[in-house]
Image (cartoon, helix red, strand yellow):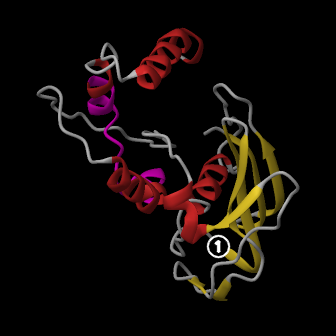
Amino acid sequence: MPIERLHVKNIKRFPEVNVKFNDNFNFITGPNGCGKTSILAAIAHCLSWNGEYSRHQDNSEYWIDVNEYGEKFRFGSGPGFLRAIKYRQDQIQTFVTPPSEEGRKSFDLSDVKTRYKLPPLVIGAQRKIGYKTINGVTREQDSEASIKDYCNKALHSLYNNSSRDVKQWLINRYFVIDKPWAKEEKTNWDHLIKSLPVIG
């Protein structure tokens, strides 16, 4: 389910930002301090509420537009969702559904974990990736637990307070891509291998 667009208003240093994404790999580049990580943080805010990492304002709003096989969705928070703004302790008042758009279903943050088919791994903006010993394939959480974990830890991973286990994820995928039920995993793996020379 690719992200088509991100809308952000009055969060961090952005008065308003609208970012369009393509269907393939997207690169966010720029000098230090220009807001690259803040864009990724805004996407993470659309997955789960967290008042710790970003400076909100009274009329903050943000959402992502996504497309799953032609069915269009919008996830995030519309204006008026904040109760209190405190340094690293912003508090949500109520879940507010983002504005509707013709042909697109809108959902607030409380619906993300049940409605959004999340990707299995996002590396994010980690600035340090520590060495980890891998012993082979490991058992992964079921999809429901994975989605919940993914949403709840999105911002923590982005700011290096918890890490995505990239190496283990790659090994697990490598050992399932030849299975008859792993068609989507095989397609994604082939796309990754084909794209590595371009992104590396």
Measured as percent of width and height from the top left, residue 48 is found at 53, 65
Farthest right residue in view? 102
User: Magenta span has 157?
Assistant: yes
Farthest left residue in view? 135
Task: Count numbered badges in the picture.
Answer: 1
In percent of the image, x 40 and y 59: which residue is there? 148
In percent of the image, x 35 and y 38: which residue is there? 129
Nearer to us in this view, 57 or 50 = 50
59 up-or-down from 10: above or below: below
Nearer to us in this view, 112 or 55 = 112
191 up-or-down from 142: above or below: above
Badge 1 element: loop
Image quarter of residue 82: bottom right
Measured as percent of width and height from the top left, residue 147 is found at 42, 53
Q: Three-letter amino acid code at disc 1?
A: Arg
Image quarter of residue 28: top right
195 up-or-down from 156: above or below: above
Mark 1, residues whose alpha carbon is within 10 Å: few (<14), some, or many (≥20)? some
Nearer to us in this view, 174 or 54 = 174
Residue 103 vs residue 62: left or right? right
Quadrant containing the N terminus in the rendered view: top right
In percent of the image, x 74 and y 36: which residue is there? 21
Residue 85 vs residue 6: left or right? left
Farthest front residue in view? 180
Measured as percent of width and height from the top left, residue 39 is found at 67, 51
Q: Which residue is mark 1?
A: 55
User: Magenta span has 169?
Assistant: yes
In percent of the image, x 52 and y 82: which residue is there? 89
Measured as percent of width and height from the top left, residue 195 is found at 55, 14
144 up-or-down from 56: above or below: above
Magenta part of the chain = 156-171
